Amino acid sequence: MLTRMVDTIGIDLTDPKIEWELEIDLRRMDKLRHEYMPEGANAYRVTVTPSTQTYSRGLHRFLFELQYGLINSDQFEPFGNPVRYQSETLPMI
């Protein structure tokens, strides 16, 4: 089981609708197969930003940058290159 760390610093989580839509996308992310995960990784860090193409006031869509790596004693060591997804490309639940 991979440990997921989420960085939402670029997202306004004071808005309940945005928070709800992000939570749905994170549940969809649970269905990822992680086929791009480097060998030896036991965690991934997700940096969430609003999608520049599909984000609007009524439609909150996000970009997700996944960086796989190894977590040891609360230190994260990244492996390989980040993998990017958008809300629209996550698996359906």
Image (tube, helix red, strand yellow):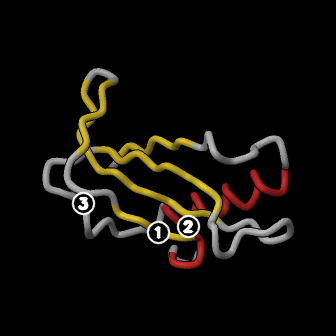
Indicate left or right for 87 with 57 as reference: left
Residue 26, percent from left and from top:
57, 58
- Mark 3 vs mark 2: in front: 3
Labelled pair 2, 1 in contact (Cβ < 8 Å): no
Of pointers 3 and 2, the one earlier in the residue sequence: 2
Residue at (24% x, 36% y) in the render = 77
- For the C terminus, give its image quadrant: bottom right
SS label for mark 2: helix
Labelled pair 1, 3 in contact (Cβ < 8 Å): no
- Given the image, on which type of amino acid does mark 3 rest? Met
Query: Could you classify mark 2 by the number of other residues whose Cα lies within 10 Å: few (under 14), some (14-19), or many (20 or more)?
Result: some
- Which residue is tagged 1? 85
- Mark 1 vs mark 3: in front: 1
- Given the image, on which type of amino acid does mark 1 rest? Tyr
- Which residue is tagged 3? 37
- Mark 2 vs mark 1: in front: 1
**Picture quadrant where residue 53 is located:** bottom right
Q: Identify the mark at residue 17; answer none if there is no mark.
A: none
- Given the image, on which type of amino acid does mark 2 rest? Arg
Q: Is residue 37 above or below residue 76?
A: below
- Which residue is tagged 2? 28
Labelled pair 3, 2 in contact (Cβ < 8 Å): no
SS label for mark 3: loop
SS label for mark 1: strand
